[in-house]
C-alpha cells in the first residue's frame, strides 16, 4: 500500500473528505501514513474550489494513535544509547508531529468526524481540526503517561485551549479515557451522536459552511488562528483589514443583494 493509499481522498462538490485508511491496524499512525497525510493536505490546500474538509477513519476507529512498533523502536533506541539518542529521537518525533499537524495549515475549515476510538496521537489530530463531531460510544484518550512517555503531537498546547488548564492537567496526568458523551460535556466535541451518522452529520455541516462566501470563511479561519497570539487591538485591525478586502469582492455584492431580495446567495469566491 502506497503512502497516499493510507489516507484516501474523496470529493463531493465543494466538500473533500480525508479518511485514515488502514482499518486492519485501527488506523495506527506510521511515518508512511504521515507522509501520505501531508501529501493529501497539500493537495486539498492548493484547490481553492474546496470550501470545507472532513477528516474521519475507515473501519471501527478514527485512529488508535502512534504505531506500537514505531514507539518500541524509539524506546529500544533510547535504552541502548541513554544520554545521546534523545537528540535524534527528538528531531524524528518533531518531524513526525508536523506530518499530521499539517491539517492546521489547510486554509478552509476542517471538521473531525470521530467515528470510533481516537487515542493518543490520533486524538491529537482530531483536536487540531477546527471542531469535532464524535460518536457517543467512541473512546477518547491522551494515554501518553500510561505508556511512559511525555505527550506529543501538540497535546499540551491544544488541550488547555479547549477545556482549560485544570481539566487538561487532569486528563494528561491521569491518561484517563473518556467517551463521546463526556467529550461533549467538557467541550471537546461540538456534537455527539451515534457512530452511524457522525460522518453524515459532519458532511452536512461542511455543506452548510460551503454555502457561505469562501473568501470570508477563509479569512475567519485566519482570524481565529491569530487569536492564539494576538492582542484585542491587533485583532481589531486584522478584522477591519479583512472586512475591507471582502468589500471589494463580488461575493459581498451578491450577499447583500440576496438579503435585499430575500433569496439564497450564490457565492463564487470572487
Image: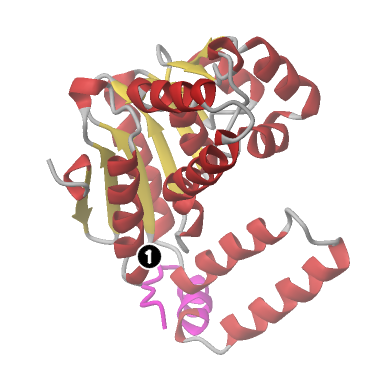
**Magenta residues, start to end:** 252-270
Q: Residue at x 52, y 26 (%)?
A: 78
Q: Does 264 lie within the magenta span?
A: yes
- Residue sitting nearer the eye, 46 or 143: 143
With respect to residue 7, does 49 lie above or below?
Answer: below
- Give residue 59's position: percent from left, percent from top: 22, 23
Image quadrant containing the C terminus: bottom left
Image location of residue 121, percent across then percent down: 48, 30
Q: Disc 1 on helix, strand or loop?
A: helix
* Residue name at image x 29 percent, y 61 percent: 14
Residue beneath disc 1: 45
Q: x, y percentage for residue 209?
A: 43, 55
Q: Quadrant of residue 66?
A: top left
Q: Which residue is nearer to you in this view: 253 or 124? A: 124
Residue 170 falls in image quadrant: top right
Q: State yes or no: residue 138 in magenta.
A: no
184 in relation to 36, above or below: above
Looking at the figure, which quarter contains the N terminus? top left
Figure check: 93 above or below 79: below
Q: Which residue is painted at 33% across and 22% down in the image? A: 69
Amino acid at each position: 500500500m502506497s503512502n497516499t493509499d493510507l489516507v484516501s481522498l474523496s470529493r463531493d462538490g465543494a466538500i473533500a473528505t480525508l479518511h485514515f485508511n488502514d482499518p486492519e491496524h485501527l488506523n495506527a499512525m506510521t511515518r508512511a501514513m504521515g507522509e501520505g497525510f501531508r501529501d493529501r493536505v497539500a493537495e486539498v490546500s492548493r484547490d481553492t474550489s474546496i470550501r470545507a474538509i472532513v477528516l474521519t477513519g475507515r473501519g471501527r476507529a478514527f485512529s488508535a494513535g502512534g504505531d506500537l512498533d514505531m514507539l518500541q523502536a524509539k524506546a529500544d533506541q533510547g535504552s541502548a544509547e541513554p544520554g545521546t539518542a534523545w537528540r535524534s529521537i527528538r528531531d524524528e518525533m518533531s518531524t513526525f508531529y508536523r506530518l499530521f499537524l499539517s491539517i492546521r495549515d489547510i486554509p478552509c475549515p476542517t471538521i473531525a468526524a470521530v467515528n470510533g476510538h481516537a487515542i493518543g496521537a490520533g486524538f491529537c489530530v482530531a483536536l487540531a481540526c477546527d471542531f469535532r463531531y464524535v460518536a457517543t460510544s467512541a473512546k477518547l484518550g491522551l494515554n501518553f503517561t500510561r505508556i511512559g512517555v511525555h505527550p506529543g503531537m501538540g497535546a499540551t498546547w491544544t488541550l488547555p485551549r479547549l477545556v482549560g488548564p485544570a481539566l487538561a492537567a487532569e486528563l494528561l496526568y491521569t491518561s484517563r479515557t473518556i467517551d463521546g458523551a463526556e467529550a461533549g460535556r467538557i467541550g471537546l466535541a461540538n456534537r455527539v451522536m451515534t457512530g452511524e451518522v457522525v460522518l453524515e452529520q459532519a458532511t452536512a455541516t461542511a455543506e452548510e459552511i460551503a454555502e457561505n462566501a469562501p473568501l470570508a470563511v477563509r479569512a475567519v479561519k485566519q482570524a481565529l488562528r491569530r487569536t492564539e497570539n494576538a492582542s484585542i487591538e491587533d485583532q481589531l485591525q486584522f478584522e477591519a483589514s479583512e472586512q475591507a478586502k471582502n468589500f471589494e469582492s463580488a461575493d459581498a455584492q451578491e450577499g447583500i443583494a440576496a438579503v435585499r431580495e430575500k433569496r439564497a446567495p450564490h457565492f463564487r469566491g470572487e
